[in-house]
Image (tube, grey):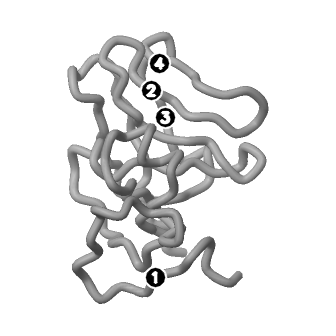
């Protein structure tokens, strides 16, 4: 019998390097969000992220994180520099890892732009990925 392959582990960090995490390189999807909440959380025109079940992410020092939001869905930032590392979503079952905080190169690439109906007017999308006004169809 062949042993199942385990996913390669990727490392991620905030800007100052104080908050770190590891995540399996087994993302199920990757998108670029242009909604106003993601713009405000990142300070950028969009937030590229990749999603996977929450159990595949390990925070190395949970006490270095600052939680923003109540309930099962929330954002996790570095408690020192404020970098947005990931968001817990889908009733707490998944995490959306901000691709810009990964140190290692993930195997996945974003497949679409979402919430383009609310994107900033100065944000020009310059690729040929599909664009959705809100979420893509299921």
The secondary structure type at the circle numbered 2 is strand
| Residue ID at (39%, 54%) | 47
* Mark pair 1, 2: CA separation: 28 Å
| Residue ID at (33%, 54%) | 45
Number of the label disc, if any, that sits on residue 34: none
The secondary structure type at the circle numbered 1 is loop
| Residues at circles 2 and 4 in contact by the CB criterion of under 8 Å | yes
Quarter of the rendering occupied by the C terminus: bottom right
Kindly tell me whether residue 26 is visible in this rendering.
no
* Mark pair 4, 1: CA separation: 33 Å
Relative depth, front residue between 2 and 57:
57
* Mark pair 2, 4: CA separation: 6 Å
The secondary structure type at the circle numbered 3 is strand
| Residue ID at (29%, 75%) | 125
* Pair 1/2: label in front: 1
Number of the label disc, if any, that sits on residue 77: 2
Provide the residue designation for mark 4: 65
């Amino acid at each position: 019998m062949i042993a199942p392959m385990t996913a390669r582990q990727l490392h991620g960090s905030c800007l100052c390097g104080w908050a770190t995490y590891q995540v399996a390189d087994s993302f199920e999807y990757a998108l670029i969000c242009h909604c106003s909440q993601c713009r405000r959380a990142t300070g950028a025109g969009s937030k590229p992220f990749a999603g996977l079940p929450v159990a595949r992410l390990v925070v190395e020092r949970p006490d270095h994180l600052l939680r923003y939001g109540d309930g099962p869905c929330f954002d996790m930032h570095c408690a020192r520099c404020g970098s947005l590392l990931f968001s817990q979503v889908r009733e707490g079952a998944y995490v959306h890892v901000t691709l810009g905080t990964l140190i290692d190169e993930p195997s996945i690439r974003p497949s679409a732009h979402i919430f383009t109906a609310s994107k900033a007017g100065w944000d020009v999308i310059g690729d040929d990925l599909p664009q959705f006004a809100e979420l893509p169809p299921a």
